[in-house]
Image (spheres, rainbow, N blue to C red):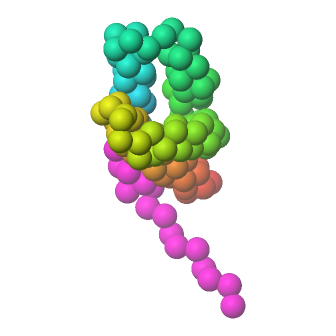
Amino acid sequence: MARKPKAIDPASVSRKLEIAHKLNWVCYGGLLLLFAVWNLLLGGSVKWWLLQTVPLLLVLPGMLKQHQRSYLWLCFILLLYITAGIVDVMMPTRGWQHGALTALSLILFISAMMTSRWLVQLQNAKR
């Protein structure tokens, strides 16, 4: 027997979405700031800075327009940052930057994933 889908309260989904959007922008800006400080001020290179920031900037237009698909792509991109951060955190000679990278990437991943889900729920509730 098929389950009946639960009714979605658009007001509660909108509140969750508003919080998630704020968290997305804080972590997204935090990652960009971390890469800038790490590579431009603490002895990295401009090439590494570009390599780290360009993938994040690719989804920026869609995030500004709040497209659900952009948040999904952001999640795929963040998997690379999470993997690199976890590998580097486990090395004893690495600095604080790797822990910050891992934490910001994980929080942004979860927040973007939930934003994508809530955007779909809100669209379905409006139908």
- Which residue is found at the position 52% from the left and 21% from the top? 53
Q: Inspect the magenta stretch and tell me whether residue 58 lies in it.
A: no
Q: Nearer the viewer, residue 96 or 68?
A: 96
Of all residues shown, which one is farthest toward the front?
93
Q: List the single residue furthest toward the right.
A: 1
Which x, y percent locates residue 48? 53, 17
Q: Position of residue 119 (x, y in %)?
A: 54, 47
x, y percentage for residue 64?
A: 51, 26
Quadrant in the picture for residue 74 = top right
Which residue does the image show at 37% across and 24% down from the upper left? Answer: 34
Q: Is residue 80 left or right of residue 106?
A: right
Quarter of the picture holding the N terminus: bottom right
| Horizontal side, residue 121 vs residue 22: left or right | right
Q: Position of residue 98 (x, y in %)?
A: 39, 35
User: In the displayed structure, would residue 56 be above or below residue 81?
Assistant: above
Which residues, given as a range, are shown in magenta? 1-19
| Residue 9 part of the magenta-drawn span | yes
Which quadrant is the C terminus positioned in? Answer: bottom right
Q: Residue at x 45, y 50 (%)?
A: 110
Q: Is residue 56 visible?
A: yes
